[in-house]
Amino acid sequence: MKRNKRLIFMTGGGTAGHVTANLALAEPLKAEGFTCMYLGMKKGIEYKLATQAGLPFRPVTSGRLHRNLNPDTLLLPFRVIKGTVQAVHWIRKEKPCLIFCKGGFVSWPVAAAGAMTHTTVILHESDMTPGLSNKLCVPFAKRVLTTFQDTVSYLPKDKALYTGTPIRASLTKGSREKGFELTGLDPDGKPVLMVIGGSSGAKALNDAVKDNLDTLLESFQIIHLYGSKNAFEAPKKEGYFSLAYASSELPDLYACADLALSRAGSNVINELLLLKIPALLVPLPLSVSRGDQILNAKHFESLGFAKMLPQEEMTGERLVGDLNKLYQDRASYQQAMNSDKAKNGTQEVLKVILEEAAKVQ
């Protein structure tokens, strides 16, 4: 198969973090003369975000492996087989020089199709330990890149490479003035707390903010991103601004933030690190996750970048107290973040992609 040496397939979905990391690479790759085409589920968040960014999109079927037995779990093998066949079709039709997989279960059939068609697959792992979908993709990958140095020890030595994580350059170009215009908050008023529950939202964070809103507003103005998949009736209070999901507005909202209350997904905590925003991290508990966010939060806390508050310990009094303490100590957190020697993930990952693309015959 004669390859299009200027075409790269990207895949990854399930959460916005998997997609936005791909989008962070699309712009510099375009500047290098490449075209990026996105493979994913049309019902997934990847379709909305990739098409909004102007990337050509090709649909692939997949499914999620649930913790309990249900009809979706029983149908998963058939969906993965169908998705693999679809991905093979798109590879043979478009002939990409390589495939970049960011994670999520849609990566699995695409990576398998890459191996079946002898197409180079590069995989990126966001979290401290590899998730199930990436573990399944590792045998198909030529290179496995990691956000954290420690993750390399969990992966094959001949494939693993610590690069950091790709982050959109646009996030550093937000306008504080535009952010305050958008939110209606007072630029000369109380410090701004940004609440981030992820693209799907976090019911526990939403409920905690709503239940303690009056007390929180005594100390902070609040920007609340409550998530697109949560039924949430936003309170109408002075000093409080809410939005289900921020896309183009996000850099300007970040520019207003003095501190954050957030889940501990790898993408968002690395964005907060890049922007030097101290955070109180409330990771997803083990009851509903494999514990990856807990490891992420503990790692950031150990480096002095953030403070961790386990969800099971999140009383109203503890939440308010920890946020006030975080703001009082913000200088020490910012000093630690300013001293961080982490790699520029976007440039390091881009370097690997360009190296592997150049080898394609």
Image (spheres, helix red, strand yellow):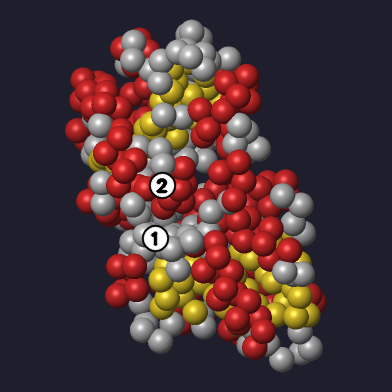
Label 2 packing within 10 angstroms: few (<14), some (14-19), many (20+): many
Residue at image mark 2 = 273
User: Gap in Å between the C-alphas at discs 2 and 1?
Assistant: 10 Å
Can residue 61 be seen here? The reply is: no
Q: Residue at x 42, y 76 (%)?
A: 161
Q: Residue at x 77, y 69 (%)?
A: 33
Q: Are marks 2 and 1 in contact (CB under 8 Å)?
A: yes
Q: Residue at x 69, y 71 (%)?
A: 8
Q: In this view, does 195 lie to the left or right of 241?
A: left
Can residue 138 be seen here? The reply is: yes
Residue at image mark 1 = 342
Helix, strand or loop status at disc 1: loop
Total marks placed: 2
Name which quarter of the figure residue 222 lies in: top left
Residue 294 percent coordinates (x, y): 28, 50
Residue 112 percent coordinates (x, y): 57, 78
Residue 170 percent coordinates (x, y): 62, 46
Q: Residue at x 30, y 47 (%)?
A: 336
Quadrant location of the N terminus? bottom right
Residue 106 percent coordinates (x, y): 57, 63
Q: Is residue 155 left or right of residue 137?
A: left
Helix, strand or loop status at disc 2: helix
Name which quarter of the figure residue 135 lies in: bottom left
Quadrant location of the C terminus? bottom right
Compared to residue 253, the image places residue 286 above or below, namely below
